[in-house]
Amino acid sequence: MSDLFQSLSPARLLPAGHYGVQGATGVSAQVVANLAAATLMARKGKTADLIAAATASGLPLVDAPKAVSGAGLEAVGTGPGKWLVFAEGSDGATLRRRLEALADGLGAVTDQSDANLVLDISGPKVREALAKGVAVDLDPRAFRPSDAATTPVSHVGVTFWQRGDAPSYRFAVGNTFAPAFLRWLATSAAEYGFSLEGTDRG
């Protein structure tokens, strides 16, 4: 695998495939396609009002590092009065207009659809692999479904949240740093067998 890393441009994503131990897949990662994203930030003093407006529209925002879903959207708290909002099967312009209508006079919206690589990461050894670089306690008693964190992972800033008991995690990684993150993930998961899908899509 080190030979592949040396021959691959640092700016290129790791190709889809199986890495590390053969005959086992302890960790799987899948690129999430057809996903619109935007940041939603409350104006000063308007956080409670924005949460109320979103909740009335079917999206029960929480001003905390939590992931919530509703009305076809998923929102992840990334800081006080700030969320990263996703819409599957949508486009950036449509999501931006929808959030701008919701947050009229209460918040600001920025399209982030082309800013991140989004990955679903799961498998029986996913906690062990992530623990090699994630500075968050992923023990199921400490980090549960809907819990989220915005934190560096091996010097790469990410936002991630747990989406199921399996467990399954969704990671949003800035496109500039996604190649480095995938190299770290493949290296960390290699001893368990690592499967990567979706990075070869145009």
Image (tube, rainbow, N blue to C red):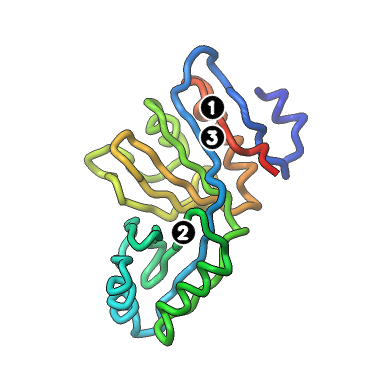
Residue 185's disc is 3
Q: Nearer the viewer, residue 135 or 44?
A: 44
Whether residue 24 sits left or right of residue 6 in the image: it is: left
Mark 1 and mark 2 lie on one chain; the one further toward the N terminus is: 2
| SS under mark 3 | helix
Alpha carbon separation for disc pair 1 and 2: 25 Å
Q: Nearer the viewer, residue 201 or 106?
A: 201
Residue 178's disc is none
Q: What x and y, as percent, mark residue 115?
A: 60, 58
Q: Nearer the viewer, residue 27 or 52?
A: 52
| SS under mark 1 | strand
Dots 3, 1 in contact, CB < 8 A: no
Q: Amino acid at mark 1?
A: Ser
Q: Residue furthest left?
A: 141
Mark 2 and mark 3 lie on one chain; the one further toward the N terminus is: 2
Whether residue 29 sits left or right of residue 62 in the image: it is: right
Q: Closer to the camera: disc 1 or disc 2? A: 2
Q: Quadrant of the C terminus?
A: top right
The crowd level at tag 3 (other Cα within 10 Å; few <14, some 14-19, many 20+) is many
Alpha carbon separation for disc pair 3 and 1: 10 Å
